[in-house]
Every structure is written in structure tokens, then in C-alpha cells.
Image (cartoon, helix red, strand yellow):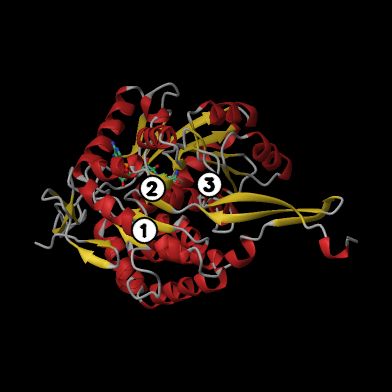
Amino acid sequence: MNILKNYIDGVWTASASKETVDVVNPATQEVMAKVPFGSGTSVDVDLAVQAAFKAFKEWSKVPVLKRVQVLYKLKSLMEENMESLAETITMESGKTYGESVGEIQRAIENIEVACGTPMLIAGDVIEDIATGIDEMMIRQPLGVAACITPFNFPSMIVFWFLPYAIATGNAFVVKPSEKVPLTMMKIFEMIDQLDIPKGLVSLVHGGKDSVDAILEHPTIKAISFVGSTPVARYIYSKGTANGKRVQAQGGAKNPVVILPDADIEMSSKIIADSVYGCAGQRCLAASTIITVDDQKKQIKEALYETVKSRTTGYGLDKDINMGPVITPQSKERITGLIQKGIDEGANLLLDGRNAHISGYERGNFLTPTILENVALDKELIKTEIFGPVMSLIAMKNIDEALKFVNGGDYGNMACIFTGSGANARKFRNEADAGNIGINIGVAAPMAQFPFSGWKDSFFGDLHGQGKHAIEFFTQTKVIIERWPNIWSRKF
Ligand code: NAD
């Protein structure tokens, strides 16, 4: 069985750890590889960081216009290898082939935006800020930065950070999720072809041990994390206590409000895609659907019809809308939450717990579930389900809906479906979430904009992507200077 190597100092290197965990295809349970795990992985992190620091010294002196040339090359390589990358994403994460292509495109868009770094990195100058004195602000790289990423977007999430980090002159260490390390193995085969100093970009595998080594390493100056809220909180508190700059994106529970004046047919299709796309394993998956006033019955019927027609199966097969969830444990947790909701009084409209996918009987499949009248103060409404489950609840008016939206712990996304500009504007202004969708089901910021989670969905100040990323990976230096013209003096 293939034990995955790290990519350190420009060389594929066996881990110092003898411990491994299996990389499993969630649709078939086939073990595709073994990934290094355990305490030995902290040695790998140290080697990667030492090499990164050496590379940073050289790279930070390369002009920014030259630095971004490697990003153009990486973009081309990813486009040329789109098919095999997408297949790998589907095989290890379970999402459909179309969803895999979509996430690679979003990754590439971040490369494209980072290619604008020669302008984005510009500072400020004020001449004669006082008589004969000029002042300027320049942006300089931090040194070595690292990212720690989750299983649900094996390619895209690394690109919220990596292109900006290296374009601004830093060295970068990637620690992907141990559940989906194969996509990054492929991407690092492409990184290996770039004309960059050895060690500038490294790949280290592992779980908590390698993460702790990153949090404790004195040479690492900045950490970008994406994953569940308890781990995000841990990374933020430990990383900042160790003097690092940290941005940590956490979990979510995304409410969607449908007002009576919404286009019901269009809204139902978009909402179904949001709830069940990627089998509900998106941090921007809609989860609680709030109907308002008298359109409850119509919406319920429209959603039911749309959802019933969705197909579930292996993501590499044709005409499949939804793949499996990531692990058997995840499937068990989701079915447990559904049962708990029923026990607490919810009405089960569509039961996805007994999925039978012919040819993939061992896969972690669930088909779409819809529950209605879910108790507002119970776990199903409060917890991130991260699975293909929709909870339908009813409210009297937009104010009641907003109160519910703002009462949750998370603030990743809130959406409204309406034909009224005034109601949309009210929602946009008053909803406590960092990403707002208006007649949009997955309000994912494009690469030019920050991925703006709030509350328990984000710990830090500057988010991933766009200008925020440029700021996160640079430190400002302000220079104030006077140049008396000594030659014009009379002696
Ligand atoms: P996770 O928190 O279990 O793992 C994320 C990363 O942290 C992995 O690399 C893992 O190896 C590491 N890790 C896990 N446990 C750790 C621990 N105790 N100490 C240190 N490191 C640890 O998350 P996941 O299950 O891979 O991903 C799903 C979660 O990610 C969901 O909650 C989802 O909402 C969230 N997510 C958030 C966003 C966002 O933008 N806010 C985007 C994608 C996913």
C-alpha cells in the first residue's frame, strides 16, 4: 500500500512517523493510500519550516512581477490537469465530478486574483507630510506562513491562501486534511514543476500532532485555518498566544428565509441545490429553511417535488446530483440527529436514512431528508449537521425570521428569497452573518472578496481571498524621511 510522502525542500520525502491512517473512498470503502499520522509528523513540520525559511530569504528579494509568473504557470498546469484532479477529488471526498470541477475553478480564480498582486501590494506615499519631510508605507512579507485545511474542499480552500502568500513574498507550508490528502499530492506534482526556490512551498501530512507543531514552531509567523468551530477556536487561541497572526474559519448553520413574494419555483430549485449540494457538506450549505406567512404549503410542496427528483450515487457516474458523506461515523452522526429531531416532535416528510445505491452498498450514502416543524430550541436547529438534511420551520413575518437568524451561534451565511427590494435591503442590513445571499442559495464570495464569516464561524480579523489575503500575508512598514540638501548650503 502506497504510504504518502511529504514534499519538503523540493523533494518527495518519507515521513519521520511510522504511524499512518487510511485514505478511504467514501463511495466504495476502497483504501486508496495510507497517510502519515502521529507524533513523528512534528519532525516533518520542522524540516519543512527550516527549508521554507531559507527559501523565503531568497524569494522575498525577487521582484513581485517575477513572483507572479509562477502563478500563471500553476494556473495553466491546473487547467491542463483538470480532469484527473477532479477525479481525485471525487474519489477521496465523495462529491460529484461536476462539483469537483467547480471547486477547481474557484481555486484557479484565486490564482488569477493573486496575479494582481503587483498592484494590490502597492503602499502609500505622502510628499511633504511636514515641510521637507516625506512619509511612505510599504508592505513586506511576513516570512513563513502555513495553512491547515478541512476535508470538504480538498483543492479550493488551500487557494484562498497559497497564491497570495507566495505572490507577496512569503514561503508556505500546507497541511491538508488527512481524509483527503491525494488532491494536494497531485497539486504538488505541479508545484514541483515551478521555477521557485527549493522549500518555498511544502506539503506535510498528519493530524493534530502536525497541527500542534505548526502552532508551536517559532519560525511560523502566520496560520490560516479552515475547519470545525472547536478546532478553529483552539487554533486561534493557541496560535495567537504563541505570537502568530491567525485567521481561523469555523463551522456554520445557515438559515434561509423565503418571503411570500418570492418566485417559488426558482427559489425551491436554488434552495435544494444549497441544502443537498456536496451532500450538505459545505460550510455554506443551507440548513434551516424559514417560510413566512401563508406560503408554507406551496413552498413545502415545491421543495418536496424538487428534492425527490435528485439522484444520489457515485460521483464519477453519470447524472448523479449527490455523492456520499465522508465517513461511516459521519453518516451515523447525521442519522442520529435526524432521529433525535423526530423524537423531539419534528415531522419527517422525506426520510433519507435507508439509502440503497446499487453497486455501492458499502458507501456512506444518505438520500435527501426533509423535516418540518422542528423544535426551535433543540439540537437539530442549533447544531451544524453537515449532511443532506433540510429543517423546515415557519415564522409570522420578516422581523420574527430575522430575530431567529440573529439568535444562532454561527454567522457564516444568511439568505433571503424575495421579490421586494425593501425587504431584501432590510435583511441585508440587519442579518448577523458575514456572507448574505439575496435570491442566491450559496452566497460564496468570489475570489475578489473576503470569505467573511462572523461569530463562531470565524476567529480573527482579516479573512481569506482578495485584498484581505494580501493584507494578512504582509506587514506594513512606515518610513518617514528628510533629505536636507546639504550641497546648496553655504559654508
Ligand atoms: P476538522 O476541524 O475536523 O479538521 C480540519 C483540520 O484540522 C484538518 O486538517 C485536521 O487534520 C485538523 N484537526 C482536526 N482535529 C484537530 C485537533 N483536535 N487539533 C488540531 N487539529 C485538528 O474539520 P473537517 O471535518 O475536516 O471539516 C468540516 C468542517 O469545516 C465543518 O465544520 C465546516 O463547516 C468547516 N468548514 C468551514 C469553512 C468556512 O469557510 N467557514 C469552509 C469549509 C469547511
Percent of width and height locating residue 304: 42, 45
Q: Residue at x 73, y 41 (%)?
A: 422
Percent of width and height locating residue 290: 52, 35
Labelled disc at residue 81:
none
**Mark-to-mark CA distance, 3 and 1:** 23 Å
Q: Residue at x 39, y 23 (%)?
A: 378
Q: Residue furthest left?
A: 1
Percent of width and height locating residue 191: 35, 70
Give the quarter of the image for residue 12. bottom left
Q: Which mark lies nearer to you, 3 or 1?
A: 1
Labelled disc at residue 219:
2
Give whichever of 85, 359 is nearer the camera: 85
> Ligand 1 quadrant?
top left
On screen, residue 207 versus residue 433, left or right, reads: left
Residue of label 3: 463
Residue of label 1: 52
Image quadrant occupied by the C terminus: bottom right
Looking at the image, do the residues carrying marks 2 and 1 touch, with CB atoms under 8 Å apart? yes
Measured along the vertical axis of the image, is residue 328 above or below residue 182?
above
